[in-house]
Image (cartoon, rainbow, N blue to C red):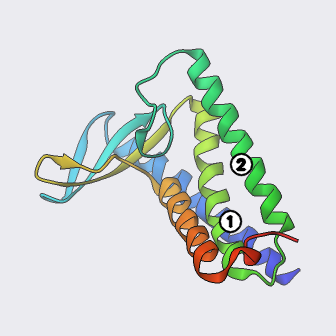
Amino acid sequence: MKHRIFYFVLIFAILIADQLTKIIIAQKIGYLNSVDVIPGFFNLIHIRNRGVIFGLFSRLSGGIHYVFLTMVSLAAFFLVVYYFFKTPTTERFLKVSLSLILAGALGNLIDRIFKGYVIDFMDFYIKKWHWPSFNLADSCITVGAIFLVFIFFFKGKSKCTPS
């Protein structure tokens, strides 16, 4: 039970940090404006992403687009929840990776459901080349997914299959 509490605290802490950073950006930086943090490399920017991670599909419009992305996000979220609860607590690295993905997915899902968009605010760039803007939730999903790939390829498939 003690181990399970750790994962729920981790998910909750990331979720709160994600939501707070998005609120702060929305309050402090005007929509489509940016603030130089490290000139020539990193800005804080206020973008409203109506797509998915790193702005994919954000140029699509219409209610069907919103409903489709929300339904896919919900399905993916519940799939990860299922695997999270089926994974034994002894598989700590796997549980942490699933916790990161859950926290990130939930943070972005909350925004998508209640606002219709997700605030992205980290903008890394070199000269005129910009990496797609992203947020803390996107970072957690990405790191969690990288951990899963690592587990799958380096620890063996049996470690990735919940009991």
Dot 2 or dot 1, earlier in sequence: 2
Of the 4 image quadrants, the one containing the N terminus is bottom right
**Callout 1, which amino acid?**
Leu
- Residue at position x 84%, y 65% from top? 85
Asked whether 128 or 41 is in front, the reply is 128
The 10 Å Cα crowd at callout 2, few under 14, some 14 to 19, many 20 or more, is: some
In the image, residue 158 lies at what x, y percent?
Answer: 76, 76
Quadrant hosting residue 149: bottom right
Q: In the structure shown, which secondary structural element does the residue marked by tag 2 occupy? A: helix
Q: Which residue is mark 1?
A: 98
Asked whether 82 or 103 is in front, the reply is 82
The 10 Å Cα crowd at callout 1, few under 14, some 14 to 19, many 20 or more, is: many
Q: Which residue is mark 2?
A: 77
Q: Is residue 94 left or right of residue 44?
A: right
- Residue at position x 61%, y 69% from top? 148
**Callout 2, which amino acid?**
Phe
Q: In the structure shown, which secondary structural element does the residue marked by tag 1 occupy? A: helix
Of the 4 image quadrants, the one containing the C terminus is bottom right
- Residue at position x 48%, y 18% from top? 61
6 relative to 105, above or below: below
113 relative to 14, above or below: above
Q: Is residue 123 left or right of residue 40?
A: right
Q: Is residue 109 left or right of residue 77?
A: left
In the image, residue 15 lies at what x, y percent?
Answer: 62, 57
Give the spatial CA distance, label 2 vs label 1.
10 Å
Q: Residue furthest top?
A: 62
In the image, residue 120 lies at what x, y percent?
Answer: 41, 45
